[in-house]
Amino acid sequence: MFDSKKEAFKELVAGLQTHICTAIEEIDGKATFKIEDWTREGFGYGSTRVISEGNIFEKGGVNISAVEGALPKSLQEKLETEESDFFATGISLVLHPQNPFIPTVHANYRYFELYDKETGAIKDQWFGGGADLTPYYLFEEDAKHFHRVHKTVCDATHPEFYPRFKEACDNYFFNHHRDETRGVGGLFYDHLRADNELNANDLFDFAKAAGQAFTEAYLPIVERRKELSWTEKQRYWQEIRRGRYVEFNLIHDRGTLFGLKTKGRIESILMSLPPRVRWDYNFQPEPNSAEAKLLEHLKPIDWLNLNS
């Protein structure tokens, strides 16, 4: 017997969107989010909120959606299920600051239900989500803060969540063709189902706490770095590294691929891509530079116990 969280999760992501957008506008001090609400008959609805050309944020988006329909055949094969109907809702955000010393950040929290085609009864449900940090210049205290906040959230639900989801994040946000992590990680979980230990209410509460902790995890980092001056050379490096971000999103990211395969709204799906990017042939940073230091840390690291 499944305990549907369909309505509760729709309400949760709508509240998170408002909370996060308000906090981002406040710290930016200039730009505001442009709001584009959309609906598609027989498919669902969503709200795309995009910020650009701000004091801090060059481009960003905080999107929510709630969609349903027949599960595409490609996803039937992937999920190893027969013909079914589905419902999915979630919030997804990406923020690209202009200052190279402020990291890019990504987060999403989502919920999925699968229904029997004949009876309409729920036959499966799961939660997914997480948050990860992608710096262009490494400040170890920023990585530690981001991980510390998320460990606190995890520990309140289950002591195994942080090490499990931290490892999953390192493994997922990994550019295999480059043999490097996308950034310094965070949390990632998918297909998280109720079991004998944790029921659907417990998992919903965890998703809620993690979503609400986003501003605590990220905005203090923005506050610490926003006044640092930067050069065009450092900006150039940021754009080189943004290229790796684009590579991951278009090659590996499941959310992007899910959206494209379910004929989702293209502008919302590709909102995550940065506005200015470079792909220079075989670009290499100078040895022993701050840029080289970042590359040395693009691997799984126990940030909370790291002593330089």
Image: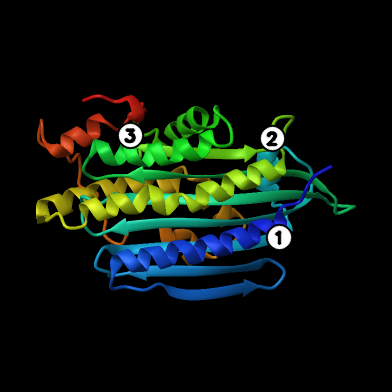
Tag 1 residue: 7
The x, y position of residue 225, in whole percent, is 21, 52
Q: Amino acid at mark 2?
A: Leu
Measured in 3D between alpha carbons, the distance from the residue under mark 2 to the one under mark 3, in whole angstroms, is: 37 Å
Question: Marks 1 and 3, how far apart in space?
Answer: 41 Å
As drawn, is 91 to the left or to the right of 245?
right
Q: Is residue 173 visible?
A: no
Q: Is residue 177 above or below residue 84?
A: above
Q: Which mark is residue 255?
A: none
- Badge 3 is on which residue? 178
| Residue 1 in which image quadrant | top right
Badge 3 amino acid: Arg
- Please provide percent x and percent y for residue 181: 36, 35
Whether pointer 1 and pointer 3 mark residues with C-beta atoms closer than 8 Å, the reply is no
Residue at (34, 68) in percent of width and height: 26
Numbered circles on residues, count: 3
Residue picked out by circle 2 = 198
